[in-house]
């Protein structure tokens, strides 16, 4: 174990970068083997940039030394400095094929707002809250410095010493990178020590369908559970061993929350927004999107298990216990 309480892996270093998000600092990893690899790039803020540069300096390396940048998913606390680092290093950026699409949508303000407003209406939010959430998500754009992906990752294929596995759930683009020879992994936000990842709401597609992120997440957890891994290095928090125990804890947490939600119906039907309010009675606005994502995900999971069902009233989803 080293000062950060990380199990030691030869050539692997962590740089902690601050984020403006409730989750706290994000891990950026530097891995030295035949070439120098950077896993994730932190948030596009002056503080995160400074932390990255200082971290590199402390390790006796310069950004120019980096040959490859591999991204675990497209969220802003993991990709923000990609363009700046690429500019200094000329590194090749590798990412899930949908990362570029997500950014294109992100910069299509009209589409994104309209889409989000449609999703939130369906979940039963009142108009003023829809407006303020759209505004909040829009403001996050300042944290993205657009960049291009040079090499698209393929599920099950190698990138340098790592094999990439797609594990959608927390986001559409979650990718686990397993060191093929040594059997340890970068798990991004798919699997984090002491945090059950929150699968965030997806956008609607052209037909108005939305992927069910918590169901996806649970399926992805089961796939990762079946892999032999010595140690995991996540997008946040410290590294951990025994990933099966961590996954079982997450699955147990999902089960308990399912039961809690079921107890909230009390013989009536409720919108996902109403369930969110009952599940998180002391919810502040800055957590609303995350908590709404969680409650909606659980309702979809319960529906898949045949325990609840929904109907639509004036375009708004209402769930009820069967
Ligand atoms: Zn994150």
Image (cartoon, rainbow, N blue to C red):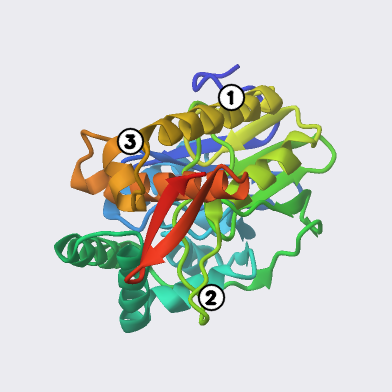
Q: For the residue labelled by badge 3, is the local secondary structure a helix, a strand or a loop? A: helix
Image position of 52 (left or right of 96): left
Residue 48 locus on image (x, y percent): 35, 49
Is residue 79 among what the camera can see? no
Foreground: 282 or 110? 282
Residue 268 locus on image (x, y percent): 34, 44
Distance between the alpha carbons at the discs numbered 3 and 2: 33 Å
Of label 3 and label 2, which has the lower sequence position? 2
Quarter containing the N terminus:
top right
Distance between the alpha carbons at the discs numbered 1 and 2: 33 Å
Which residue is found at the position 49% from the left and 30% from the top? 259
Q: Are marks 3 and 2 in contact (CB under 8 Å)?
A: no
Q: Are marks 3 and 1 in contact (CB under 8 Å)?
A: no
Of label 1 and label 2, which has the lower sequence position? 2
Residue 5 locus on image (x, y percent): 53, 19
The circle on residue 280 is none
Residue 100: name its quadrant: bottom right
The circle on residue 279 is 3
Q: According to the image, label 1 marks what residue?
A: 249
């Amino acid at each position: 174990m080293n000062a950060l309480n990380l199990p030691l892996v030869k050539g692997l270093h962590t740089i902690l970068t601050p984020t403006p998000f409730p989750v706290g600092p994000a891990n950026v990893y530097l891995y030295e083997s035949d070439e120098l690899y950077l896993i994730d790039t932190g948030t596009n803020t002056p503080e995160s940039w400074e932390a990255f540069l200082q971290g590199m300096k402390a390790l006796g390396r310069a950004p120019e030394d980096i040959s490859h940048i591999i991204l675990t998913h497209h969220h802003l606390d993991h990709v923000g400095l990609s363009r700046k680092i690429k500019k200094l290093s000329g590194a090749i950026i590798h990412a899930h094929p949908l990362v570029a699409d997500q950014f294109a949508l992100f910069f299509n303000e009209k589409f994104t707002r309209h889409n989000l407003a449609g999703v939130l209406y369906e979940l039963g939010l009142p108009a003023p809250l829809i407006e303020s959430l759209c505004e909040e998500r829009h403001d996050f754009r300042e944290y993205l410095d657009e960049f291009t992906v040079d090499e698209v990752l393929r599920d099950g294929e190698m990138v340098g010493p790592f094999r990439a596995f797609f594990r959608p759930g927390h986001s559409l683009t979650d990718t686990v990178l397993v060191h093929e020879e040594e059997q340890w992994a970068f798990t991004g936000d798919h699997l984090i020590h002491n945090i059950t990842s929150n699968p965030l709401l997806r956008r609607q597609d052209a037909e108005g369908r939305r992927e069910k992120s918590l169901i996806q997440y649970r399926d992805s957890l089961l796939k990762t559970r079946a892999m032999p891994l010595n140690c995991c290095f996540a997008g946040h928090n410290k590294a951990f061993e025994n990933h099966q125990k961590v996954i079982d804890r997450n699955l147990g947490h999902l089960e308990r929350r399912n039961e809690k939600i079921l107890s909230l119906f009390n013989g009536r039907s409720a919108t996902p927004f109403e369930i969110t309010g009952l599940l998180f009675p002391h919810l502040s606005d800055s957590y609303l999107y995350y908590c709404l994502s969680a409650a909606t995900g659980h309702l979809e999971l319960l529906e898949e298990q045949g325990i609840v069902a929904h109907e639509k009233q004036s375009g708004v989803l209402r769930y009820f216990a069967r």
